[in-house]
Amino acid sequence: MNALGNNWVRVGTLDDIPVRGSRKLTVGETTIALFRTSADQVFALEDACPHKKGPLSEGIVHDGCVTCPLHNWVISLESGQAQGADEGATKSFPVKLSDQDILIDLTGLSA
């Protein structure tokens, strides 16, 4: 990772993540899953479903959400909130693209 001022950290390029797929990175003790949608939007969530901590990075990306591979909970990629009748959230991190570079704001990550 390369620091680019304040808490924005370069973590790779858009080509590092398959379309409608994910890539994981570890920061300290936290694993973050980066998701790329079919419209080339990128989102970052802690790689743990709020239900049973299933690996969201192994889930299916669809319609702005990811479905947990363990129990099919649907989690919003933008907010980390469980959808439908399920309740709970996983931590989300702001992401921005600079050309093809992916930058994440890690301000919400515990020190």
Image: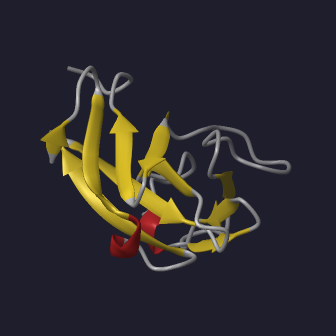
Q: Is residue 2 above or below residue 53?
A: above
Query: In the image, 111: left or right of 64?
Result: left
Instruction: Give the mark count.
Output: 0
Residue 50 position within the rendered picture, expressed as x and y whole percent measured from the top left: 55, 45
Please tell me which residue is depicted at 70% across the width and 46% down the height of the picture.
82
**In front of the other: 57 or 17:** 17
Q: Nearer the viewer, residue 65 or 56?
A: 65
Residue 92 rendering spot, x and y as whole percentages: 51, 38
* Rendering coords of residue 43 (x, y %): 52, 51
Instruction: Judge from the rendering whether residue 8 lies leftward or rightward of residue 43; answer left or right.
Output: left
- Seen as rendered, the residue at the extreme front is 99
Q: The C terminus is located in which quarter?
A: top left
Farthest residue in the bottom direction? Answer: 18
**How is the protein colored in the picture?**
secondary structure
Residue 27 visible? The answer is yes
Q: Position of residue 60 (x, y in %)?
A: 60, 75
Residue at (62, 71) in percent of width and height:
61
Determine which quarter of the picture holds residue 105.
top left
Observer able to see residue 56:
no
Image quadrant in which you'd find residue 38:
bottom right
Q: Above or below — where is 81 with respect to 21?
A: above
Left or right, 66 with reference to 110: right
Where 8 falls versus 12 (above or below)? above
Residue at (50, 54) in percent of width and height: 52
